[in-house]
Image: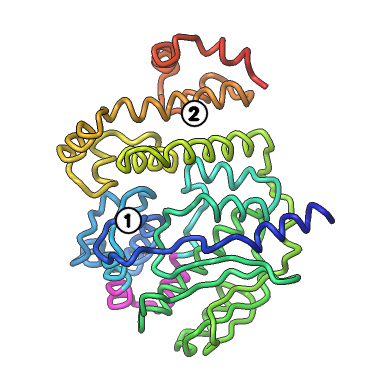
Amino acid sequence: MLQKETIRQKLSAVPTVARYGSEMETPLHSMLGLRALVETMAELGVPARTLLAGTGISPNLLGDSQARISVRQKIKLFSNVQRFTPDPAIGLMAGQRQRISDLGVFGYAILSSATFGKAIDFGIRHVRLAGPVIEKSFRVEGDVAIFEGHDTIDLDDLLPIASEFWFGSMQSLISHTLGRTFDAHRLLLPYPAPAHAHRYSEFLGYPVEFDAPVMQWHFDASMLDLPLPAANPIMAEVSTGFCARMLEDIRGEHELIKQIKEACLNSVGGIPGLEDMASRLNQSTRTLQRRLMEAGCRYQDVIDDVRRRLAIEYLERTTMSVEQVAERSGFSDVSNFRKAFKKWTGRTTAYYRARRH
C-alpha cells in the first residue's frame, strides 16, 4: 500500500506534460505520429503531396520524432486532413497506428518500467518534445486517474479531429505498453457530438460525454500498479538513469548541442547523420555546420559523446553482448565499434564490461 500511495502522490504532483510556446512560427514541435495520418489518408485515396500542400513539411521527415515544425504548420496539416478526408473518423483511425517503440531510448525506458504508474511518471517527465497542439496534463484524484487536455490556441472546428488523433493515439500507446486493451471509465469532450460520434465506441469501447465543460480522460487509478509485460529492471534503470543524466548534463550546454543530443537520445532509426540532423532541425547542412563551428565543436564530436556514454552505460550496467551494445550505440559493424570505443575512452570494451554492476 505504501508504494501504491507513493506513486499516486508522485503522479498527482506532476505538472503539465507538454505545452507549446506562443511563437506560432518557431519550429519546436515534433512530427511524431504524423506519418500515421499521412499513411492512413493515402489508404483512403489522398496522396501525401495533396495532404502536405501548403504546410512546408517535407515528406522525408514524416514519422521522424526529432524533426521540427511550427505550430502553424501542424495546424495547417490538420486543416488539410479535415478538408480532404473521405472518412470523418480519420483521427481515430490514424491514432490506432501509433506505437510507443517510436520513442527511441525513451521508449525502452517506458516499456521496461515495472508498473504502468512508473511508465506514466517517466513519460510525463521526459517525453517533452512531442509538440502537441492541445496542451496536456495528468493527475490523480482519489481513485481516479485523469489525463486532461486544454485547447489554449482556439482550434475551433479543428478541435474534434485534433482531439480524436490525441486520444486515439494514446489508446494505442497505452494498450501497447500494458500488453492489453486499455479500459478507461469515460471520456469527456468539450464539443458537440459529431455526425460520426457512433464510431467512437468502435475504437474506444467506453462512454463518451460530449458538450462537457472540460476535456478529460478518466481511468481507475489502481491501474497505476499494474505490472508491465515487458518490465525489465536492469533496462529500466539503465535507460531512465542514462536519460536523466544526459538531460541534466546538457541543460547548461549550448542550445544547439542540447537539441542535437536530445535528438540522438530520441532517434528511432539509429544515430542521425549530419544531413539527417540538419533536416530534423529544419535548417540546411551548411547552416548547421556553421552554427556548430560557432559553438566550438563538430557534429561528429557531439554524436561521439552520446555514443560513448550510451555504450559505457550498457557495458557497465547490463548483460547485453558487445554486438548488441554496438547496435544500440549506432554501429552496424562490431569491429568498427570496438575501434571507435578504444579511441573514445583509451580502454577496451572488456575493461568496462569487467566493471559491470
Snapshot quadrant of residue 213:
bottom right
Snapshot quadrant of residue 31:
bottom left
Secondary element type, mark 2 = helix
Determine whether, in the image, residue 250 is placed left or right of residue 78. Answer: right
Q: Quadrant of the N terminus?
A: bottom right
Which residue position holds label 1? 28
Q: Name which residue type carries label 2.
A: Leu
Picture layout, residue 282 above or below residue 236: below
User: How far across and how far down the image is residue 232, in percent?
Assistant: 67, 38
Q: Residue at x 38, y 63 (%)?
A: 20
Which residue position holds label 2? 310
Snapshot quadrant of residue 210:
bottom right
Picture layout, residue 284 above or below residue 54: above
Q: Quick check: is 91 in the magenta stretch?
A: yes
- Depth check: give the residue in front, 1 or 217: 1
Q: Which residues are magenta?
A: 79-94
Q: Name which residue type carries label 1.
A: Leu
Q: Residue at x 28, y 56 (%)?
A: 27
The outermost residue toward the front is 252
User: How far across and how far down the image is residue 115, in percent?
Assistant: 70, 51
Q: Earlier in the sequence, mark 1 or mark 2?
A: 1
Determine whether, in the image, residue 289 is placed left or right of residue 217. Answer: left
Marks 1 and 2, Cα distance to the nearest angstrom?
25 Å
The outermost residue toward the right is 1
Q: Residues within 10 Å of mark 2 (few under 14, many from 20)?
A: many
Q: Residue at x 61, y 55 (%)?
A: 120
Q: How is the image coloured?
A: rainbow
